[in-house]
């Protein structure tokens, strides 16, 4: 398979990843479990998925892998806390400022220089997200807003570390992260009720929304720069309300529709340009 074909396949894997991640909003709305119990339950199931994928992993845990795993867990916890303390729109919008942090970290640690195409796509995406969430954004919930920004920074760190581990197996970081998430959230599971619907939701989230999605992301990040992967993954907040609309009937407004179309156009523009624009970065093998 040529480098161009590999990149195209990786972009497709990232789109599928974004689609799987976007289902979390729906299921978190539906399930009655607390955020920490959800973290423990889906981490437990995802851990099994990664155990099978990595074929009973035997590896030495490096400080960098441990840092990535801890940031992975903290990303989830800070985002859930942010959603509780500020509006969901604020939390998502501020977390998805992460491309800005990826630009900084990627240039410092990976020597991956952003192309003009990246800046153009970023401007389109931020405009689209503002249109999408504009009427719901507010200055309320300062603590929640700060946690959402922190979640975006942590998310960027996870991406950069996984990209730096491309010569090894980036999936190891998520395996360790889910192990930590299971240990932290497991006690909270005993306070919840286990019904066929709750068990089914946790299984879906663990297998598909976390497990399979991060397996696909681990494969894709080896061949796509951290910033490009982050830009493609901004499809997640756009797809999230689609599932809510289809299942719960919550209909987005006209501005949200225009915003979503702009984000989709930006991601498509970046994906097409990546196939025809020479790679001008000089990525390093790691930290």
Image: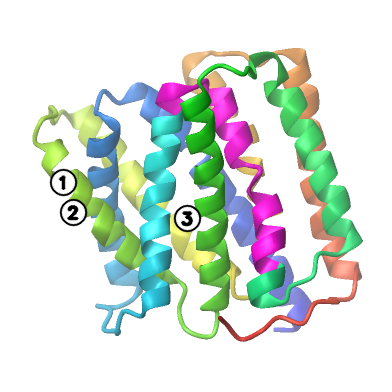
Q: CB atoms at circles 2 and 1 under 8 Å apart? A: yes
Front in this rendered view, residue 113 or 250: 113
Q: Nearer the viewer, mark 2 or mark 3?
A: 2
User: What separation in Å lies between label 2 and label 3 (alpha carbons)?
Assistant: 21 Å
Q: Residue at x 43, y 65 (%)?
A: 68
Q: Which residue is mark 3?
A: 213
**Label 3: few (<14), some or many (≥20) within 10 Å?**
many
Q: Is residue 185 magenta?
A: no
Helix, strand, or loop for circle 1? Answer: helix
Q: Is residue 274 visible?
A: yes
78 is higher (above) or lower (below) than 43: above
The rendered magenta stretch, by its main secondary structure, is classed as helix
Q: In the drawing, what numbered circle is on residue 183? A: 2
Q: Nearer the viewer, mark 1 or mark 3?
A: 1
Front in this rendered view, residue 149 or 165: 149
Helix, strand, or loop for circle 2? Answer: helix
**Label 1: few (<14), some or many (≥20) within 10 Å?**
many
User: What separation in Å lies between label 1 and label 3 (alpha carbons)?
Assistant: 22 Å
Dot placed on the residue nearer the N-terminal end, 1 or 3: 1
Residues shaded magenta: 83-106
Q: Which residue is mark 1?
A: 186
Q: In the drawing, what numbered circle is on residue 105? A: none
């Amino acid at each position: 398979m040529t480098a161009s074909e590999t990149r195209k396949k990786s972009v497709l894997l990232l789109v599928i990843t974004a689609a799987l991640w976007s289902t979390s909003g729906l299921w978190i709305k539906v399930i009655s479990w607390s955020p920490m119990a959800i973290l423990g339950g889906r981490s437990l199931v995802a851990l099994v998925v990664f155990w099978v994928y990595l074929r009973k992993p035997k590896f030495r845990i490096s400080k960098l892998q441990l840092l990535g795993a801890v940031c992975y867990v903290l990303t989830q916890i800070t985002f859930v806390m942010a959603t509780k303390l500020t509006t969901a729109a604020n939390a998502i919008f501020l977390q998805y400022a992460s491309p800005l942090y990826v630009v900084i970290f990627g240039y410092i640690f990976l020597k991956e220089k952003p192309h003009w195409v990246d800046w153009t796509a970023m401007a389109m995406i931020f405009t689209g997200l503002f249109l999408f969430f504009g009427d719901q954004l507010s200055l309320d919930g300062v603590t929640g807003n700060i946690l959402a920004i922190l979640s975006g920074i942590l998310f960027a760190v996870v991406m950069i570390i996984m990209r730096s581990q491309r010569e090894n197996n980036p999936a190891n970081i998520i395996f360790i992260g889910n192990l930590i998430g299971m240990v932290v959230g497991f006690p909270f599971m005993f306070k919840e009720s286990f019904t066929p619907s709750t068990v089914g939701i946790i299984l879906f989230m663990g297998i598909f929304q976390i497990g399979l999605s991060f397996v696909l992301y681990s494969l894709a990040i080896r061949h796509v720069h951290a910033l490009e992967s982050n830009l493609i993954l901004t499809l997640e907040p756009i797809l999230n309300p689609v599932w809510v609309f289809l299942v719960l009937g919550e209909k987005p407004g006209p501005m949200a529709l225009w915003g979503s179309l702009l984000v989709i156009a930006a991601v498509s523009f970046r994906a097409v340009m990546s196939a025809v624009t020479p790679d001008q970065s000089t990525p390093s093998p790691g930290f």
